[in-house]
Amino acid sequence: MTYQDNVQAVRERIQAVQQESALSSKDVRLICVSKYHSVEESLGLYQVGLRDYAENYVDGLLEKKAAMPDDCTWHLIGPLQSRKVKDVINEVDYFHALDRLKIAKEIQKRADHVIKCFVQVNVSGEASKSGLAPSELEGFIKDLAAYDKIEIVGLMTMAPHDASDEAIRSYFGGLRDLGQAVQALDLAYAPCLELSMGMSSDYPLAVAEGATCVRIGSALYQE
């Protein structure tokens, strides 16, 4: 399969789910997770129209961004160490894994503009996953009021790899409900209209539950 085939297959699957699910978003941003893949491979996807790229690690993002065209949008989707904030925060368009005030304070100190952030929530409660417990979310959001360099554009979560489709949908639906609860707070710095959820293995389930951003790697790069 070509890169064009891969992109078309993913987009068609998203469109099919949108037609079937009343909960789905009309606009779903397709984010290409480029970790484990070369600049040349990512350029192949760029040439067929993809402009959103995500990396889990700071060094990988900086390396790819330096080599890719300037009109790409960059997403950092992995946990960020406080000592690395200064290296990357002004190089990203979106940070998907905010879950600690320590990192928020460092972003406030280092950012030269307002950073669009997703708060990561561990909806499934997996011990191996980062993110806030759902019960911690509202307090965390309110604690961010003093940080004028941070805009909470949405929430992010990951579902367990070995869960049933029904369980995965419940986790994604849970994030949607949490997002609506944050919206109800009516905070100017936390519009929280976006949901970053769904990867190659489960993105159709995420779209069915209202994802506005899906983070896709292998389904786009496969040959």
Image: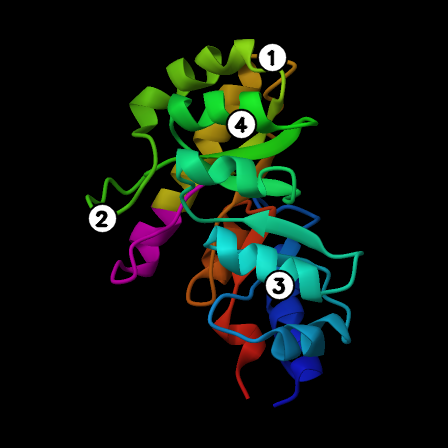
Q: Residues under labels 3 and 2: Cα distance?
A: 28 Å
Circles 1 and 3: CB distance less than 8 Å?
no
Q: Tell me, for residue 107, which label it has, or none.
A: 4
Circles 4 and 3: CB distance less than 8 Å?
no
Which residues, given as a range, are shown in magenta?
156-170
Circles 2 and 4: CB distance less than 8 Å?
no
Give the mark nearest the N terminus, 3 or 2: 3
In the rendered structure, which amino acid carries the disc numbered 4? Answer: Ile
Give the mark nearest the N terminus, 2 or 4: 4
In the rendered structure, which amino acid carries the disc numbered 3? Answer: Lys
Secondary structure at numbered mark 4: helix
In the rendered structure, which amino acid carries the disc numbered 2? Answer: Ser
Q: Which residue is located at x 30 percent, y 51 percent?
A: 167
Residue 60 in sight in this render: yes
Give the mark nearest the N terminus, 1 or 3: 3
Q: Position of residue 92 (x, y in %)?
A: 63, 44
| Residue at the disc numbered 1 | 186
Residue, far top: 146
Residue 167 magenta-highlighted = yes
Q: Position of residue 191 (x, y in %)?
A: 62, 23
Q: Tell me, for residue 64, which label it has, or none.
A: 3
| Residue at the disc numbered 2 | 128
Q: Which residue is located at x 42 percent, y 45 percent?
A: 172
Q: Residues under labels 1 and 2: Cα distance?
A: 32 Å
Closer to the observer: label 1 or label 3? 3
Give the mark nearest the N terminus, 4 or 3: 3
